[in-house]
Image (cartoon, rainbow, N blue to C red):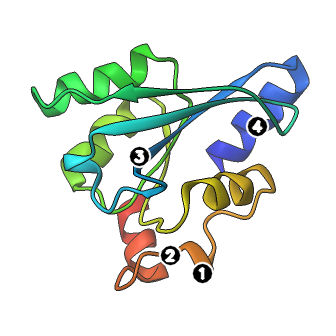
Amino acid sequence: MAYKMLLIEFKRRRMQIKTALCVWQDRISPVFDSAQMLLIATIERKKIIGRCYEVMPFNSPSSRTLKIFNLGVNVLICGAISRLYADMIEAYNIHLIPFVAGNSEQVLDAYLKGALPAPEFQMPGCGIKRLSELKR
């Protein structure tokens, strides 16, 4: 619900949304906690107006989370994620879409269409029940 409010506010103000995807080669990285690369898409009016890659530090959970926050990320799309990281990311008011798998471009396209989370991009073994447990 909070995410929809964020999108409404961004749309009203015609602001950009920075969406980060944890990637490995051309796919969503299977585990956020050890992911090494972020694809950051700057989105305005449901169109990508910029993209770049950022290397993730391995120092500590707080340094990784702080890097994402300092990059201005509003939304993080990732594979499996530990409770520690999920809680820290959400504490920075970054909307988290976890347990996603698949080709990063297809996932980004589905996100732009408002189709995430979706069964076709769900990590094997991580059902909707698991997703709802994380949101608690």
Q: Of the numbered discs in the image, which one, if any, rests on residue 7?
A: 4
Q: Are marks 2 and 1 in contact (CB under 8 Å)?
A: yes
Between the residue at mark 4 and the residue at mark 2, the CA separation in whole angstroms equals 23 Å
Q: Upstream in the sequence, badge 4 or badge 2?
A: 4
Q: Which mark is residue 47?
A: none
Q: Which residue is mark 2?
A: 122
Of mark 4 and mark 1, the one earlier in the sequence is 4
Residue drawn at 65 percent across, 51 percent down: 108
Q: Whole-Å distance between the Cαs marked 2 and 1?
A: 5 Å
Instruction: Quickly name the residue at label 1.
Output: 119
Around disc 2, counting alpha carbons within 10 Å, would you say few (fewer than 14), some (14 to 19), or many (20 or more)? Answer: some
Residue sitting at x 63%, y 43%: 2
The spot of residue 129 in percent (x, y) is 43, 81
Q: Label 1 neighbourhood size at 10 Å, few (<14), some (14-19), many (20+)?
A: few
Q: Secondary structure at mark 3?
A: strand
Is label 3 or label 2 in front? 3
Relative to residue 86, is residue 110 drawn left or right? right
The single residue placed furthest to the front in the displayed view is 25
Residue at x 19%, y 26% (from the top left corner): 62
Mark 3 or mark 1: name the one nearer the start of the chain. Answer: 3
Question: Tag 4, which secondary structure?
Answer: helix
Q: Please identify, in this view, whether the residue under mark 4 or under mark 3 is nearer the observer.
A: 3
- Per the image, the residue denoted by label 3 is 22
